Image (cartoon, helix red, strand yellow):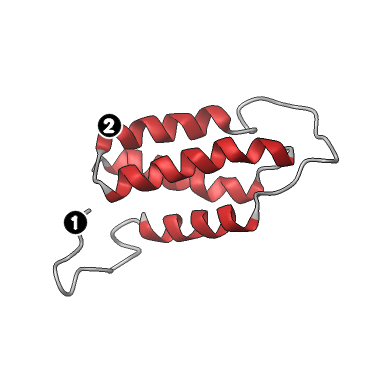
């Protein structure tokens, strides 16, 4: 897969724990994260590109918005999923998973 795209995906995922959204708004980023994970698992570059674009559009950091005290961080299951994906998409020099047995397909 395209290293630049993987780096962008990882950067977006690393930002998600800092996001603050209304509780009801978290379903869309969660769906985008799942689409990203599915594309990565399927080694589907075009689908990964779409998933990254979806996350970019959903980012509250794209525009200055008035902070609402009712905004909350990501739900715990989403935070755990994001953390796992960040480690999975680790740059080759950061992760040696699969190198010893030759199973690293990325």
In the rendered image, the vertical position of residue 84 relative to residue 32, given as above or below: below
Can residue 76 be seen by looking at this rendering? yes
Given residues 23 and 93, the one toward you in this image is 23
| Local SS, label 1 | loop
Q: Is residue 51 left or right of residue 65?
A: left
Q: Quadrant of residue 65?
A: top right
Residue 9 at x, y percent in the picture: 42, 42
Residue 38 at x, y percent in the picture: 35, 46
Q: Is residue 106 left or right of residue 29?
A: left
Residue 84 at x, y percent in the picture: 45, 60
Mark 2 nearby-residue class (10 Å; few <14, some 14–19, many ≥20): few
Q: Residue at x 58, y 46 (%)?
A: 16
Which residue is disc 1 drawn over?
A: 105
Q: Is residue 69 left or right of residue 95?
A: right
- Name the image quarter holding the N terminus: top left
| Local SS, label 2 | helix
Given residues 80 and 2, the one toward you in this image is 80
Can residue 21 be seen by looking at this rendering? no
Which residue is disc 2 drawn over?
A: 46
Count the marks: 2
Q: Residue at x 35, y 63 (%)?
A: 94
Mark 1 nearby-residue class (10 Å; few <14, some 14–19, many ≥20): few
Given residues 58 and 92, the one toward you in this image is 58
Given residues 92 and 88, the one toward you in this image is 88
């Amino acid at each position: 897969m395209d290293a630049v795209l993987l780096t962008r995906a990882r950067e977006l995922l690393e930002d998600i724990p800092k996001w603050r959204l209304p509780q009801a708004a978290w379903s869309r980023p969660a769906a985008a994260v799942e689409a990203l994970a599915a594309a990565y698992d399927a080694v589907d570059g075009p689908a990964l590109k779409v998933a990254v674009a979806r996350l970019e559009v959903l980012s509250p950091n794209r525009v200055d918005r008035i902070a609402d005290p009712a905004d909350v961080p990501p739900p715990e299951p989403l935070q755990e999923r994001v953390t796992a994906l960040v480690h999975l998409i680790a740059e080759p020099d950061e992760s040696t998973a699969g190198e010893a047995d030759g199973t690293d397909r990325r």
